[in-house]
Image (tube, helix red, strand yellow):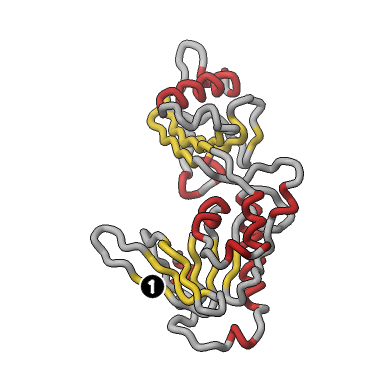
């Protein structure tokens, strides 16, 4: 956020997009923003517009005119799957590994000790594990307590020296984050439905791990897609780059 504001940009939090409003030629006229906490609805106008929304949300917010276009129709071939993220705080260190790890658990996909890998969580004495529970379709409707109980049983297998025996590590607190529609299903044939960051709409661009780049649905893919989108905006033709608008900055919806 500081990187953006220090360079003249603005960041609007708690500003859910309500509608993508079009000009007569099908280009974006403005983003309609829904007011929250008693605020009135408002509009955001810009030279260029970027959607960093998940593919399922983007499908819902497609303007009617765009739904007739083959480029946007292809999005229907991508569908997000449920994912559950777990944040667990322990009273002692469980590992000293400074990287993301793939788990041998059939329930827990990947995990990392954020007290080591992320300076914001740095703690020399206690671990904070962040894990991904996937596939999560059978767990998305279960209670947080059920999910944590199953997770702890799996962690006992991964860290028996710390979580079993006479004096096991204690779970201090936890947070369960459920995303009913997250990364797209990477099933055979899905690659053909992934869109480029450049769309047929001159002033509208896409970002997100579902867009075309060399990674699948992942944080790495999301970051790379953002870089490709930024490059596409910088390379846009002068007719778009130089047109007057109420804002001289791109506007992104996420």
Residue designated by label 1:
43
Q: In terms of depth relative to the viewer, which is nearer, 133 or 212?
A: 212
Q: Quadrant of residue 205?
A: bottom right
**For the residue carrying disc 1, how many other residues have a C-alpha within 10 Å: few (<14), some (14-19), or many (20+)?**
some
Q: Is residue 250 above or below residue 173?
A: below
At a point 48% along the width and 78% down the height, the residue shown is 46
Name, please, the residue furthest toward the top.
Answer: 166
At a point 48% along the width and 77% down the height, the residue shown is 29
Q: Is residue 91 above or below residue 185?
A: above
**Location of the N terminus (image quadrant):** bottom left
Image position, residue 211 (x, y; %): 66, 57
Image position, residue 158 (x, y; %): 60, 23
Q: Is residue 157 above or below residue 44?
A: above
Asked which secondary structure carries label 1, the reply is strand
At a point 65% along the width and 71% down the height, the residue shown is 200
Image position, residue 196 (x, y; %): 69, 63
Q: In terms of depth relative to the viewer, which is nearer, 73 or 112?
A: 73
């Amino acid at each position: 956020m500081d990187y953006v504001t220090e360079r003249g940009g603005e960041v609007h939090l708690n500003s859910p997009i309500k509608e993508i409003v079009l000009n007569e030629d099908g280009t974006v006229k403005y983003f309609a923003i829904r007011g929250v906490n008693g605020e009135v609805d408002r509009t955001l106008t810009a030279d260029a517009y970027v959607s960093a929304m998940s593919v399922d949300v983007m499908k819902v917010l497609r303007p009617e005119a765009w739904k007739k276009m083959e480029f946007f129709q292809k999005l229907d071939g991508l569908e997000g799957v449920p994912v559950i993220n777990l944040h667990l705080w322990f009273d002692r260190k469980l590992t000293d590994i400074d990287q993301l790890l793939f788990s041998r658990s059939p329930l827990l996909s990947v995990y990392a000790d954020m007290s080591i890998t992320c300076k914001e969580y740095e703690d020399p004495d206690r671990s904070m594990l962040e894990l991904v529970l996937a596939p999560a379709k059978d767990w998305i409707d279960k209670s947080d307590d059920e999910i944590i109980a199953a997770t702890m049983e799996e962690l006992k297998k991964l860290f028996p020296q710390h979580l079993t025996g006479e004096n096991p590590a204690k779970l201090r607190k936890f947070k369960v984050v459920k995303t009913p529609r997250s990364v797209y299903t990477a099933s055979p044939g899905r690659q053909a439905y992934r869109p480029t960051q450049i769309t047929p709409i001159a002033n509208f661009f896409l970002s997100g791990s579902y867009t075309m780049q060399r990674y699948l649905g992942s944080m790495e893919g999301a970051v790379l897609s953002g870089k490709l989108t930024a490059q596409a905006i910088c390379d846009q033709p002068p007719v778009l780059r130089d047109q007057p608008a109420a804002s001289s900055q791109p506007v992104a919806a996420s």
